């Protein structure tokens, strides 16, 4: 049984590769900007980094786990598409990596990988029933129930950002209407903040932004100062987040909901209304059994999950 694995986190901005121990330690890592030009350039750099990490570890045949930012079929290794990387539609990543590495790699959606990382090493360590929410540019995550990652028949389960919270809501990037992502994703908060900033109520947001865009971080600053418009904006996003959490509580009866990602860093103006809203959208007995906590792993969540899944394969 291998005691270490090589984990890859393919992001829209950075490609990260690390050596990860079974105990979650990371003795070596590398991070480079994700190459442009499509899958071939990315895979060439990925394989080179895997080789460098393996050579440094003195073990050429370490198991490999790869977290992918988009839906994929873990059985076939085919990536359906990646929202922020061009050219990956129906791409046979599993087969391609096998041909380059001479061994299979464990492929997993990055939200599912992050859920495993939290359960194995983070805020949910030892927890067998949890929902993980990654609030970033979009909203992703994963579900573990009875200690088992829920991937679904074709690997598309766990798209927690696309649960419907408003039947008459806005159009989501996925094409559906009223998804959680249209309220609580970074792109959605930035969109709404821009609209508010253009009104009389948005004076403080305009002051903070100056000549730049009104970012979610600036909205949080204004809300913490007590600005009413910013407070209402984040409270609305938080209530949508709480409604989605209530759905997950009813569906999966978790003992823990973990919230991570950069937008979670907006803190109390967003997460306070979310926690308060959960009880309005689920059974009281199920709500009493669940805790809501922030991620303990930061940017390493998906990386550690990819390693854990590779070691378990």
Image: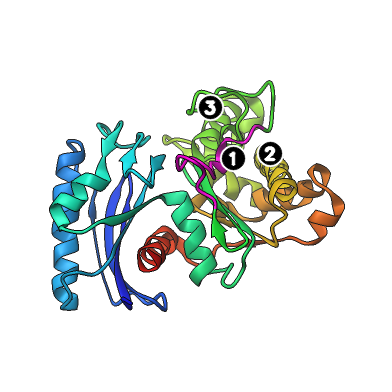
Q: Position of residue 258 (x, y in %)?
A: 60, 59
Is residue 286 highlighted in magenta?
no
Main secondary-structure element of the magenta-colored stretch: loop
Residue 55's disc is none
Residue 172's disc is 3
Distance Cα–Cα, label 2 vs label 1: 7 Å
Distance Cα–Cα, label 2 vs label 3: 14 Å
Residue 240's disc is 2
For numbered disc 2, what is the local secondary structure?
helix
Q: Position of residue 34 (x, y in %)?
A: 24, 47
For numbered disc 1, what is the local secondary structure?
helix
**Which badge, 1 or 3, is on the more N-terminal residue?**
3
Q: Which residue is mark 1?
A: 184
Q: Residue at x 39, y 76 (%)?
A: 22
Give above or below for 195 relative to 243.
Answer: above
Q: Do the CB atoms of the residues marked 2 and 1 lie less than 8 Å apart?
A: yes
Give the quadrant of the N terminus: bottom left
Q: Locate residue 91 relative to residue 126 in the image: left or right.
A: left
Q: Position of residue 128 (x, y in %)?
A: 62, 65
Residue 215 at least partly seen = no
**Which badge, 2 or 1, is on the more N-terminal residue?**
1
User: In the depicted view, which residue is nearer to us: 53 or 277?
Assistant: 53
Distance Cα–Cα, label 1 vs label 3: 11 Å
Give above or below for 281 relative to 3.
Answer: above
User: In the depicted view, which residue is nearer to us: 234 or 256?
Assistant: 256
Residue 113 at least partly seen = yes
Q: Residue at x 41, y 75 (%)?
A: 24
Is residue 161 highlighted in magenta?
yes
């Amino acid at each position: 049984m291998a005691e270490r694995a090589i984990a890859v986190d393919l992001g829209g901005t950075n490609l990260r590769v690390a050596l990860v121990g079974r105990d979650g330690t990371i003795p070596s890592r590398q991070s480079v900007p994700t190459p442009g030009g499509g899958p071939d350039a990315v895979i060439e750099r990925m394989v080179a980094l895997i080789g460098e990490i393996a050579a440094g570890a003195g073990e050429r045949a370490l198991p490999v786990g790869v977290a992918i930012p988009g839906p994929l079929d873990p059985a076939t290794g085919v990536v359906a598409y990646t929202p922020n990387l061009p050219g990956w539609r129906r791409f046979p990543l599993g087969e391609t990596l096998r041909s380059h590495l001479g061994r299979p790699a464990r492929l997993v959606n990055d939200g599912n990988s992050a859920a495993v990382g939290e359960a194995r090493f983070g805020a949910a360590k030892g927890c067998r029933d949890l929902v993980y929410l990654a609030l970033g540019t979009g909203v992703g995550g994963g579900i573990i129930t009875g200690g088992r990652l829920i991937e679904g028949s074709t690997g598309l389960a766990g798209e927690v950002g696309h649960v419907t919270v408003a039947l008459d809501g806005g159009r989501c990037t996925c094409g559906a209407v009223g998804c959680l992502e249209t309220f609580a994703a970074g792109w959605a908060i930035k969109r709404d903040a821009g609209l508010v900033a253009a009104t009389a109520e948005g004076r403080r947001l305009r002051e903070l932004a100056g000549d730049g865009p009104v970012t979610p971080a600036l909205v949080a600053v204004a809300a913490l100062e007590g600005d009413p418009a910013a407070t209402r904006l984040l409270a609305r996003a938080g209530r949508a987040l709480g409604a989605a959490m209530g759905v997950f509580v009813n569906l999966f009866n978790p003992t823990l909901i973990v919230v991570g990602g950069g937008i979670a860093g907006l803190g109390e103006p967003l997460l306070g209304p979310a926690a308060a809203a959960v009880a309005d959208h689920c059974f009281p007995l199920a709500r009493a059994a669940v805790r809501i906590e922030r991620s303990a792993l930061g940017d390493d969540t998906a990386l550690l999950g990819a390693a854990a899944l590779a070691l378990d394969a």
